[in-house]
Image (tube, coloured by chain):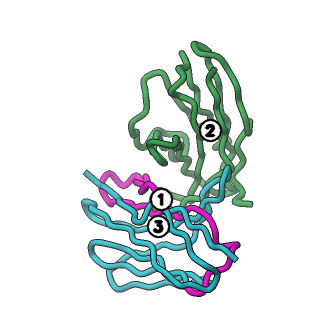
Amino acid sequence: EDQVTQSPEALRLQEGESSSLNCSYTVSGLRGLFWYRQDPGKGPEFLFTLYSAGEEKEKERLKATLTKKESFLHITAPKPEDSATYLCAVQSYSGNTGKLIFGQGTTLQVKP
Amino acid sequence: DSGVTQTPKHLITATGQRVTLRCSPRSGDLSVYWYQQSLDQGLQFLIQYYNGEERAKGNILERFSAQQFPDLHSELNLSSLELGDSALYFCASSVVPGDIQYFGAGTRLSVL
């Protein structure tokens, strides 16, 4: 069964204090791994897609990396506006449906 | 703005009632997905449609049903509502299955 586990559940950082969020996954044939950002009461906002081990993508202060078993979302010198819940999801080739299996998320709070 | 429109934003109803949630996908997107987000379960895939046809089903209750119309908008029907059905319901769309999914702002359902 496809499964995604994110850690930590919650993370508090001071502004400028870099850190990483972890996403461990098991999937029968990884089609893609997705990172989304979700603000309270809003829909998930797409950040990155990674398709193969070794791939990296960057956007402003965020950098996502992928191995065969996990993905990391590195946050460099975060600002208070980076506070949100970060969701990781996997998509399998099985059934060619495109459905996403999500982890429980990591809630990030960045204090000024 | 993701381009995915969901209505209504909030819905308050009583146990035993039936409600309909509506989703208009991004222009050009053929695939629509429905997800349920509750505090204890996280984001869970419910059902997917592609170009009017059901493509995949997740852990969707028999009391729930959905359809995608010729103009590609989709409706999620929830009947015989129970307290436990209270959650955020999200619609997402993609060009084709497997492509990046963009989420709407969600419908918050409260069953009293």
Nearer to the camera, A96 or B36: B36
Task: Give how far across and how far down residue B2 sits, in percent.
Answer: 69, 60
* In this picture, residue B106 sits left or right of residue A7: right
Task: Give how far across and how far down residue A71 sits, in percent.
Answer: 38, 74
Nearer to the camera, B32 or B2: B2
Nearer to the camera, A48 or B48: A48
Q: Which residue is mark 1?
A: A105
Task: Give the number of the mark in front: 3 or 2.
Answer: 3
Give the residue type at disc 3: Phe
Say the numbered circle drawn on residue A34.
3
Task: Give how far across and how far down residue A54 sits, in percent.
Answer: 34, 86
Check contact, mark 1 vs mark 3: CB within 8 A: no
Q: Using the image, determine if residue A46 lies above or below residue A58.
A: above
Q: Residues within 10 Å of mark 3 (few under 14, many from 20)?
A: many
Residue extending furthest top?
Answer: B16
Figure colour of chain A: cyan
Q: Residues within 10 Å of mark 2 (few under 14, many from 20)?
A: many
Task: Give how far across and how far down residue B76 sits, in percent.
Answer: 58, 32
Q: Are both tags, 1 and 3, on one chain?
A: yes
Figure colour of chain B: green
Q: What stretch of residues is rendered in magenta?
A: A76-104
